[in-house]
Image (cartoon, rainbow, N blue to C red):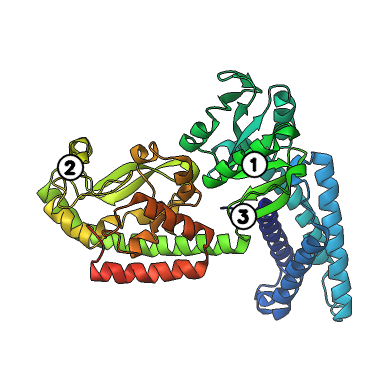
Amino acid sequence: MGVKRSQVQNFIIYIGDVVGITIGYFIMTYIRFYYDITMAWTKDSKVIYRWLIAIFVLTLVYLMFNPNLDFFKRKFGKEFLCNLKTNIAAAALMATIAYLIDDARDYSRFIYLTTMVFSFVWMQVSHCIYRWYILTYRKYSSITRKMLIITTHDKADEVVRNIVKEKTWNLWVTGIIITDRDHVGKKILDIPIVANRDTMFQYAVREVVDEVFLHVPYEEDEQIRKVVQQFEEMGITVDLNIRLFEMDVESSTKYLDKIGGYHTVTFAAKEMPLHMIALKRAMDILGGLVGLAITAVVTIILGPLIKLESPGPLFFSQKRVGRNGRIFKIYKFRSMYQDAEERKKELMEQNEMDGFMFKMKDDPRITKIGKFIRKTSLDELPQFLNVLKGDMSLVGTRPPTVDEFEQYEGYHKRRLSMTPGLTGVWQVSGRSDIVDFEEIVAMDVDYICNWSLKRDFEIILKTVMVVLNSSGAR
């Protein structure tokens, strides 16, 4: 589940350029009227009016000319020319609009010219810094797509070099899979060969993989179809040769793309528009802030009760598996005795779940206050910190523990193709009555394939009702 990459890139750089022209405009306006002790110019509606025109013009230039094409491959000279053209076009449009609305005579030439100069310098410096930072630290970024290259031994060096030199801003090749030889343990351009044809699916299930690039001989079309289908079942995006566009693979989204100079067709579970991603994240940030404020109040009350009944930390943290296999620490109020994890192995025979999750009625590891905070779901409140950090979302699929994840089959991993949530479909569907893990997987996959903000709002409202009624929890 993803978003078109060019949309994200253009939007971020566009926002930076808007900030630059805004800073430049108001600094130059202040310099122009610095002698005005009364600061009357700050109350002049035309100041704001002309600033809005400048933003409108810059936006128009972006829409008309797409100035950020090949942004991350540009050298200093090409960057200079692109920024010069952008600012000349913006200046020309601003002058035209000022003439058409009969504002040219009153408009300060000093502000007009120096704002454009400031904007140009800002773009040149900020673009270079932004490009350097993203390309240097993309390996560690949570939004970077972790990619596997799947190819044959004779093409491996060429394919890896072409993709690496492309300098895609949110792509990092983590491993190579050679399908016709066993070269596991070797490296190409310091990138390890991690699997062969027989072990590649097992590797993809256990490791962080967002996307695979497939470059194999054309005569293997039927085998490729099966490979694509299996990765699709894991929720992993697949890029492969353009010639195979007619391949009959069940996929929610299929579109043309380009990876490292290779024309590809991309098979993806679901592509989300940028504005929907932004709205979902904005909802998470707002909900996280409100939730942490509530958590702070509840901590004052629950803290002494938890500590009095059972010595140990107030909060419990545990490694969980997030989007496409990323590991993070989840936080909860401690509802169990300190040795709970060690005692879990002794209780596995009493597991009520059919599958990889653990659930047990009257779990002896849970404290008395723990039973109360679990029944009321108060133990989940610290996870608003995970939501604010971006490890989790308000709504999504519940993140499994590491030991549960290590038992996953390929198709189970698809439920991790989206950022995990504080609540989800399973939580509002009578979770104590559902004992079949496969049913949970089916519900999660259906949620991912049919995701919408409207559905998230519905799940949040249902969650509130479930919590208030203390239903479905143990």
Q: CA distance from mark 2 to mark 1?
A: 53 Å
- Report the amino acid beneath label 3: Val
Q: Nearest the camera: 468 or 414?
A: 414
Residue 265 appears left or right of 172: right
Q: Quadrant of residue 237?
A: top right
Q: Which mark is residue 3?
A: 3
Task: Identify the residue shown where x is 64% and y is 32%.
Answer: 150
Q: Which mark is residue 312?
A: 2
Q: Position of residue 39 (x, y in %)?
A: 66, 74
Look at discs 2 and 1 and give the one toward the viewer. Answer: 1
Q: Position of residue 408 (x, y in %)?
A: 41, 40
Q: Which mark is residue 251?
A: none
Task: Identify the residue shown where x is 75% and y is 34%.
Answer: 218
Task: Identify the residue shown where x is 51% and y is 59%.
Answer: 281
The vertical placement of 23 against 71, above or below, is below
Residue 398 seen in this snapshot: no
The vertical placement of 386 against 456, above or below, is above
The vertical placement of 461 against 75, above or below, is below
Residue 16 appears left or right of 204: right
Residue 274 appears left or right of 199: right
Q: Do the numbered discs 1 and 3 sit on residues whose CB atoms are within 8 Å?
A: no
Residue 5 seen in this snapshot: yes
- Report the amino acid beneath label 1: Arg
Q: Nearest the camera: 142 or 244?
A: 244
Task: Identify the residue shown where x is 38% and y is 65%.
Answer: 290
Residue 253 appears left or right of 305: right
Q: Kindly identify which residue carries mark 1.
A: 225
Look at discs 2 and 3 and give the one toward the viewer. Answer: 3
SS of the residue under disc 3: loop
- What crowding class fits label 2: few (fewer than 14 Cα within 10 Å), some (14-19), or many (20 or more)? some
- What crowding class fits label 3: few (fewer than 14 Cα within 10 Å), some (14-19), or many (20 or more)? some
Which is nearer the N-term, disc 1 or disc 3? 3
